Image (spheres, rainbow, N blue to C red):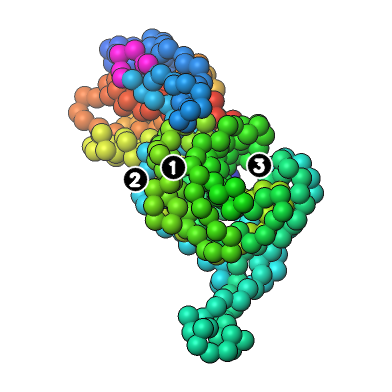
Amino acid sequence: MSPRISFPRSTNVPDPWSAVAWHHVEPGGNGDRRRRTPLSCSVRVAKALESRAATSRGTTSATSLTGHHSPQVFPGWCHVLVCFAAAILTFAGATDAAELQLDFASMTNGAPPAPFRAALTGGGPPPDWRLVEIATPSPFETVIEPSSSRSHETVMAQLSTDATDERFPLLIYGAEEFADFTASLKFRTVSGKAEQMAGLAFRLKDERNYYVIRASSLGNTLRFYKFVDGVRSDPIGVDLKIPSGEWHTLEVSAKGNQIRCRLDDREAIPMLTDTSFVRGRFALWTKSDSVSHFKSLRLHYDVLKTLPQRLVERAQEKFPRLLGVTIYARQDGKPVALASTDPAEIGRPGASAEEKALGDGLIQAGGAPGYSSAVFPLRDRNGDPMFALRLKLRSFAGQTEANVAARGKSIADELEMLVRAAEHADEIAGRGR
């Protein structure tokens, strides 16, 4: 089920577009072909938008997994590798960077706080994740009495010792999702008869679909694999000594379809490529009866922006003379502004022009003192309206509604290509942030 994006609404805000006198126009026709109707009119798109090749969903595999996936082709444009974010209406390509530090030492002992939540892949009883206090040796312990040379710190621990084989405890950080990132995790394995493992799950959609890189102190291995619908892939990795009871640093970087891994400041696994998951959450991970401790998780990541935000930014970049841009989509059956050059517009309901663009794929154009406006549908690959685009344009002497529609149509075409490039089955049906 597609999630809903919720925005605050106000029913007492006057419609800023109520001054626009809308007219029936034919884009590209002459200005005399119009019927004046007060405050409302519509025109059906005179020419169907160029159909582009529909491409089936595919996966570029990680090294030694499953074959390669060819770039998707859009006639008359370019070759595009579609590996965009698997969440509703999100467009990969954000440039803003941010940092997140999760230091468990600053948290209170006991159950993990929100937004963490425990989960389980596979079978067996639920995991037991807790913040616990542990003793940490002092560098002077060999010189003075051990009991007085130890301090204490809080760590996140998985304490369940159930030895079910295909049992993978997770502690999911649910505050937000991430696409491109570099993550640094401090961990140590403590005990376990069947397994002594610890790792980091990433780009997690749910407890049955994610990537993971894990370390094993019993097996002395570092492995990457993925779960798809709960089924684990064949592992990829190296054999190396990972002593239990010692702190280690696992660093994972993901950029696009490329995944890199370092352990204790050394590259551990050659670069992997995979497009099964392009965004998701993080989770601490163990297996079976592993008791493991986690000290901290630090993330450097690109801030994800919604597709409507990216559309507004692209319009501003490519068409700097525009007076305003607003993107609408349906929420609870009605058009609502999701992104705009005017922050005050976000969350406001659309008018009849947006309703007709989203419902019937109609273009409308009109004018008000000092500016002109046009509303266009932005269509998906199936030709169905996904967004309504409202443009605020400068007016000039002798301008007709047909001129307004023609000027706006080139902008709408530019943005529609981005919609079709970013659109992917996972984007429409995926989970929100």
* Residue designated by label 2: 95
Q: Which residue is drawn at 31% across and 19% down?
A: 78
- Residues at discs 1 and 2 in contact (Cβ within 8 Å): no
Query: Where does residue 240 sit, x and y in percent of width and height?
Result: 49, 49
- Of 307 and 239, nearer the camera is 239
| Magenta region, residue range | 73-78
Kindly report the distance in space between the C-alpha atoms of the residues bearing marks 3 and 2.
29 Å
From the viewer's side, name the closer residue of 174 and 231.
Answer: 231
Q: Can residue 346 be seen in this view?
A: no
Residue 105 image point, x, y percent: 56, 71
**Which residue is at a point 38% across and 35% down the rendered structure image?**
311
Label 1 packing within 10 angstroms: few (<14), some (14-19), many (20+): some
Q: What element carries label 2?
A: loop
Is residue 76 among what the camera can see? yes
Q: Is residue 220 inside the magenta stretch?
A: no
Horizontal and vertical percent for residue 248?
50, 60
Residue 76 is inside the magenta segment: yes
Magenta span dominant secondary structure: loop
